[in-house]
């Protein structure tokens, strides 16, 4: 919190002569006024600076918008808020007051504290309601689920949509015939009213809110003067049929824009309808950019003697036949790359990524083992491994029991996904004996330990 200092005067001088000098003068400096400036002086300085730095007057200056917002922040203060700023700086204005560059809309700020708006000094923004003039209607974003097949092959989708269009009877005026709206009595035609908000402990300020009587328009029609078709709403609902094209190779999250297909409003162009693609889970394939990944099971015989067969059915329905090199033994987890069989590249569908296949070996079941000559099979297979040499001094016979790796990962110790893919030195203490300390010589009596264990059950 920023501090301030009070310049004292002799006791013979009236206390009204005492005044606080703020340490933080950043907002005053932005407007080019002294801290002792009156409210009128601040308003005049704001109008002058705002015109100078307005973005419309500085189209080639990328910093113009930021400077304009800073001017608004510097001028935004009723007497109570200004006193808080003089006393405590930006921190005294409450959460979100990190500095002039982070303040909100200029017209909103000015109107909140001075009762005006962008129309107060006519810088090209605002109307009834005091908000900035929009040059386009609001965009509508629609999430759309697509499959890998859709993104691989491309797809055309037709759908029924509903939107608001300008009423053809009243041409968007909302009025019946030549009837004219009357100024809203509640907000006096401004489109907004003031409410009191708490800005700090025991401190209250004024904030602007949309008029509830006229919905922020500043005027309203009598019931009998409203258009019969739109009931004074200026727009009516229309059902339309739209078509979007999902092109080959579009990435996940791609946005398909239907320009001008959004809701219409009088006086401004309609916004856009944006479809954002979301790829659904696929049972067989996984996408990584322009590449594809899948898993295929082969038999033990294929792993040892090779294979030549259709391994997969691709996303376009084609069968993909692959033959392994003669004499090549495949180990569990080996992968192969099929060049040019991945995803098409967006805008260049003739260029494709690669398809990676991870080969999993499917072991034979017990029924197969019962049906073969075991001695003959044993002679064909590589010999079994002998006992370790030299033999340990103590050997315990432990019963064989099947288990599930999930049971191990459910224990309390932190086991990562690669727990069994590396050594256990960090878990079970393998390594140099010097890294361990022998605590057998440490003597603890009951007095030192307080007669109780250091860790007790909760």
Image (tube, rainbow, N blue to C red):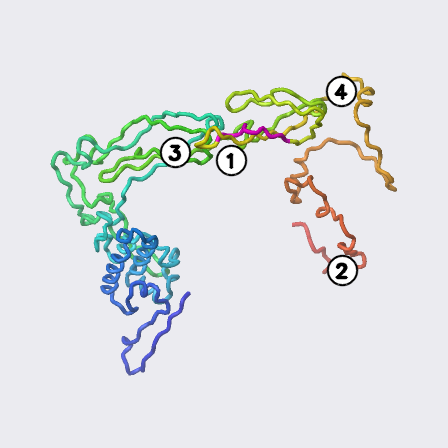
How much space separates mark 2 and mark 1, taking CA atoms? 66 Å
Say if mark 1 contacts mark 3, CB within 8 Å: no
Name the N-terminal-most of marks 1 and 3.
3
SS for tag 2?
loop
How much space separates mark 4 and mark 3, taking CA atoms? 57 Å
Say if mark 2 contacts mark 1, CB within 8 Å: no
Q: Nearer the viewer, mark 2 or mark 1?
A: 1
Q: Magenta part of the protein: which range? A: 335-344
Name the N-terminal-most of marks 2 and 1.
1
SS for tag 3?
strand
Neighbours of disc 2 within 10 Å: few (<14), some (14-19), many (20+)? few
Q: Left or right of 225: which side holds 270?
A: right
How much space separates mark 4 and mark 1, taking CA atoms? 44 Å
Say if mark 4 contacts mark 3, CB within 8 Å: no
The residue to which callout 3 is attached is: 256
The residue to which callout 1 is attached is: 289
Residue ID at (34%, 78%):
8
The residue to which callout 4 is attached is: 369
Q: Is residue 428 above or below residue 451?
A: above
Q: Left or right of 108: which side holds 305?
A: right
Q: Is residue 337 above or below residue 4?
A: above
- From this viewpoint, which residue is outermost toward the left? 178
């Amino acid at each position: 919190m920023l501090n301030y200092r009070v310049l004292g005067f002799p006791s013979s001088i009236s206390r009204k002569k005492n005044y606080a000098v703020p340490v933080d003068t950043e907002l005053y400096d932005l407007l080019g006024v002294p801290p002792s400036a009156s409210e009128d002086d601040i308003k005049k300085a704001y109008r002058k600076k705002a015109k100078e730095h307005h973005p419309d007057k500085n189209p080639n200056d990328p910093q113009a918008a930021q400077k304009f917002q800073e001017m608004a922040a510097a001028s935004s203060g009723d007497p109570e808020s200004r006193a808080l700023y003089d006393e405590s700086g930006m921190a005294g204005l409450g959460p979100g007051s990190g500095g002039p560059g982070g303040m909100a809309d200029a017209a909103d700020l000015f109107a909140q504290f001075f009762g005006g708006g962008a129309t107060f000094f006519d810088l090209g923004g605002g109307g009834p309601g005091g908000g900035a003039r929009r040059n386009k209607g609001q965009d509508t974003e629609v999430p759309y689920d697509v499959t890998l097949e859709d993104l691989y092959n491309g797809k055309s989708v037709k759908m029924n949509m509903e939107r608001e269009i300008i009423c053809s009877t009243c041409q968007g005026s909302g009025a019946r015939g030549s009837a004219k709206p009357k100024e809203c009595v509640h907000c006096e035609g401004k489109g907004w009213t003031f409410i009191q908000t708490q800005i700090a402990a025991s401190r209250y300020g004024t904030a602007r809110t949309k008029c509830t009587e006229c919905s922020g328009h500043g005027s309203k029609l009598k019931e009998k003067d409203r258009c019969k078709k739109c009931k004074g709403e200026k727009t009516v609902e229309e059902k339309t049929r739209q078509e979007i094209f999902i092109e080959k190779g579009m990435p996940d999250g791609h946005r398909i824009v239907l320009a001008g297909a959004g809701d219409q409003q009088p006086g401004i162009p309609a916004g856009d309808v944006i479809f954002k693609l979301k790829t659904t889970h696929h049972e067989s394939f996984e996408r990584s950019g322009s590449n594809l990944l899948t898993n295929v099971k082969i038999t033990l015989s294929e792993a040892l003697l090779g294979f030549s067969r259709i391994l997969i059915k691709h996303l376009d329905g084609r069968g993909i036949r692959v033959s392994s090199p003669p004499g090549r033994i495949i180990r569990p987890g080996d992968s192969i790359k099929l060049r040019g069989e991945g995803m098409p590249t967006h805008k260049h569908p003739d260029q494709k990524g690669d398809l990676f296949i991870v080969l999993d070996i499917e072991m034979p079941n017990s029924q197969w083992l019962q049906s073969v000559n075991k001695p003959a099979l044993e002679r064909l297979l590589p010999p079994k491994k002998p006992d370790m040499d030299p033999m340990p001094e103590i050997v315990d016979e432990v019963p064989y029991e099947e288990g599930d790796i999930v049971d191990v990962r459910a224990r309390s110790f932190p086991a990562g996904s690669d727990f069994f893919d590396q050594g256990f030195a960090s878990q079970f203490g393998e390594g140099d004996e010097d890294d361990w300390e022998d605590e057998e010589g440490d003597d603890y009596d009951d007095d030192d330990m307080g007669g109780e264990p250091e860790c007790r059950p909760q």
